[in-house]
Image: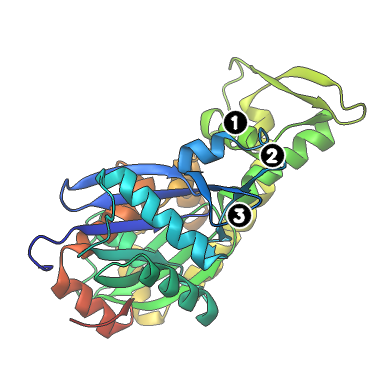
Amino acid sequence: MPLFGAEGIGLDLGSMQTSIFLTSTNEVSLREPTAVLVSAANMQDVLCVGREARAMMGRTGGEFVLLEPIQQGAVADVEMTALLMVALCEKAIKRKRPMEKAVLVCSLSGGATTVERDALFQAMTATGARRVAAVRSSVAAAIGCDLDISRPRGRLVVSMGHAVTDISVLSMNAVVAQRAVRFGGQNMDEAIVNYLRREKSIVIGLRTAEQLKREIASVSPAGHDADEEPVLLRGKNALTGAPMSMNITSADVSRALERPVEWLLDIIRSAIVNVPGELVADIRDSGIQLCGGGALLEGIDQRLEKETGLAVRMSEHPQDDVVVGLGALASNDRLLNTLIRNGAAEGTVE
């Protein structure tokens, strides 16, 4: 167990959203946008972070700058990332200097480069936490959804994030095989924006596209209900720039997603084909554990099941699997040390 009195913090830094799990409350205590609003005159002058900062997008003058320090699932600005982590932890824990004595465990993409890994550790260390560690996203997700990866039995985990999708085979608390692609929910949002501009001549923003994807999109192999009610979409005319509105159906949004979803399914199928032979039978029996915010896309589990022939399982809240796993590890030194020794996590063994 961590040092007596220490706060265990699991922190999932996403390109779009950051989630925090506190061991003191044993719950996900915060989910807020990964955004920082600073003064243009002094970039060290942080005005607000998270939800308040994102609300200012497109509404600020030249005196303010909105920064998103995590790009494509990796730390793009070490200093701003550290400031963001401390500020969001202050919100979650409700006190100043929240990192004192804290054990901070963050997620790390399976495809992270040495430079990206170093940037993450620099940011974590700059928070002042007593101990820092980074755990592979798929490993954290597996622990977060109570998947037993300690046995000599292969388990396939697909973690779909906003910018990165991790596909890993786990066994004996180690990563046996993995593939990470810089593709996720953000690419689907962009596909919706591009489709509506091209096919409907309406221009919308990525936030609106994300909302459409979350609320009415479906990629189920069963198709769509012909009697579904359309939703009114507001944007601007692609030719004149004038404000316009039109009715959009679930089928419209799903057509926009067809190409990126097919591409993603191809990547997953390819990864499964390349699973080590001795683990194929294990995966055929246990199926796929689908995790991450991308798992919330309506019908993606059914589509993946149909395309791969494997059973697909999800937890009740797949978007929280990673951060819940990180939080569990922040309060379990023994397991965290085991993962570090096995290469499934990085940090110093204590």
195 sits to left or right of 18: right
Q: Is residue 132 visible?
A: yes
* Nearest to the observer: residue 73 or residue 182: 73
Q: Residues within 10 Å of mark 1 (few under 14, many from 20)?
A: many
The answer to whether the residues at label 1 and label 2 have Cβ atoms under 8 Å apart is yes
Q: Residues within 10 Å of mark 2 (few under 14, many from 20)?
A: many
Which is more foreground, mark 1 or mark 3? 3
Q: Residue at x 59, y 14 (%)?
A: 229
- The amino acid sitting under disc 2 is Ile
126 sits to left or right of 10: right
The percent position of residue 53, horizontal first and vertical second, equals 53, 40
Which is more foreground, mark 3 or mark 2? 3
Q: Earlier in the sequence, mark 3 or mark 2?
A: 3
Residue hosting label 3: 42
Q: Which mark is residue 212?
A: 1
Q: Residue at x 59, y 35 (%)?
A: 56
Q: Earlier in the sequence, mark 1 or mark 3?
A: 3
Q: Residue furthest right?
A: 240
Residue hosting label 2: 192
The percent position of residue 11, horizontal first and vertical second, equals 34, 57
Quarter in which the C terminus is drawn: bottom left
